[in-house]
Amino acid sequence: MYETLGINKELVDKLDIAETELTNIFKKIDNDCFINSSKVMKAFQENRVSEIHFGSTTGYGYNDIGRDTIEKVFANILGADDALVRSQFISGSHALTVALFAYLRPNDIMLSITGTPYDTLHEVIGIKENKSSLKSFGIKYEQIDLVNDDFDYKKIEEYLKQNKVKLIEIQRSKGYSTRKSLSIKKLEKVIHLIKSIDSNIIIMIDNCYCEFVGTKSPLEVGADIIVGSLIKNLGGGIAPNGAYIAGKKELVDLASERLTLPGEGREVGPTLGINKSILQGLFMAPSVVASSLKTAILASYLLEKLGYKVEPKYNEERVDIVQNIEFGNKEDLISYVKGIQKGSPIDSYVVPEPWDMPGYDDEVIMAAGTFTQGSSIELSCDGPIREPYIAYMQGGLTYEYGKIGVLKAIQTIIDNKKQ
Ligand SMILES: *Cc1c(COP(=O)(O)O)cnc(C)c1O
């Protein structure tokens, strides 16, 4: 059957060996998936989710009991007092922006302790000039870099003892960098340190790509507020768009008044028919995240055997669903990304090429044969065309489809080398 998809027998033989070797690692993922599924089931049952919650509102969106129930379900699952889950958030970056503008006031200090934040936040903060940035409102920004893929505990302590900081941002996933993503254990340690110096600091976590990887939420180890996208993990590939902000009630309320307007906050926001998709996506999410993890682990294993540098390695603990593959040369990177596109259900016939994307310094090549535009819980892969030629791959709605994509991508490298 593989051969009808253009995947050779030799490669399938390698796959068989890989899957045997990966049995125990996959078992651990299945176990986490069971725990996370149980959490989801319990939240649905405790909140008495019913067909009535699949209903819809238009216009102002007053009295949307489906939306209100969805927010309770999300809060339960994430270990939050409260949550704001809305399709009026355009993206994860938008939700992060709303949160930052909701909590920071002129002369406040925002501190990032994971180095430079995600690319899309540079103009939001004012790291890159923009007339609407936080900086333009007189909000100060400082950052402390990671050392050896861990927090710089000493520097953080010194800084907090000398400065009154309003908000600390922690980005768990690596984004477009080569550092490791940050585990819950490291988070717990740094949060404990911060709170012991100043318990009033708002600790905000960019939780993108990390939900349902493992079984603990950052809120369970003391974070105040977490933010993520619904076209990533928690949308389960079914939510059509949106994002969430979850955590302490007063912080969720502040965010709701910034998203809509002071005085109306969370009471407004029509759902326009998407409630069922959000609930069904969340229901599927533990299993979809597990499939994405298995897809990433398989890719990590096979590509390491082929001689490429991978991060994380197949047997390392994972914090998010992102797999870095360092190709070391332009040709293999491009072949791999083209192969991921060939192994996708949508636009498989389209050949992606490197292009000058707005906001990036180098050309970028992207594969996204997805049902939802920009969805990266679906198998997707992109790489900036610069040394050392790294592809960032993530997603996979089912392991079987993820596997087809990865095999097709490897086969494309092999075929292009022969030419
Ligand atoms: C995806 C992501 C975001 C937000 O991205 P959007 O594409 O705007 O949803 C923010 N931070 C990290 C680390 C991410 O991976």
Image (tube, helix red, strand yellow):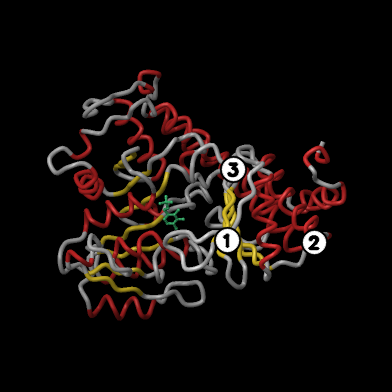
**Quadrant of the picture in which ligand 1 is shown:** bottom left
Residue 31 showing in the rendered view:
no
Residue 261, how many percent across, how many down?
17, 42
Query: Foreground residue, 86 or 312?
Result: 86
What is the quadrant of residue 393 in the picture?
A: bottom right
Q: Earlier in the sequence, mark 1 or mark 3?
A: 3
Nearer to us: label 2 or label 1: 2
Q: CA distance from mark 1 to mark 3?
A: 15 Å
Residue 151, how many percent across, how many down?
43, 72
Q: CA distance from mark 2 to mark 3?
A: 24 Å
SS type, badge 1: strand
| Three-letter amino acid code at the position of disc 2 | Lys
Numbered mark located on residue 355 in the image: none
Q: How many residues crowd around disc 2 within 10 Å: few (fewer than 14), some, or many (20 or more)?
A: few
SS type, badge 2: helix
Query: Foreground residue, 285 or 222?
Result: 285
| Three-letter amino acid code at the position of disc 3 | Gly
Write down the residue under mark 1. Answer: 383
Is residue 309 toward the left or the right of residue 48 in the image? right
Tags 2 and 3 in contact by the CB under 8 Å rule? no
The residue at the point 56 percent across, 44 percent down is 289
Tags 1 and 3 in contact by the CB under 8 Å rule? no
| Three-letter amino acid code at the position of disc 1 | Gly
Write down the residue under mark 3. Answer: 369
Write down the residue under mark 2. Answer: 417
Q: CA distance from mark 2 to mark 1?
A: 19 Å
Check the image and report above or below for 62 versus 362.
Answer: above
Residue 182, how many percent across, how many down?
48, 63
Is residue 355 toward the left or the right of residue 269 in the image? right
Work out which quarter of the rendered image holds the N terminus and state it. top right
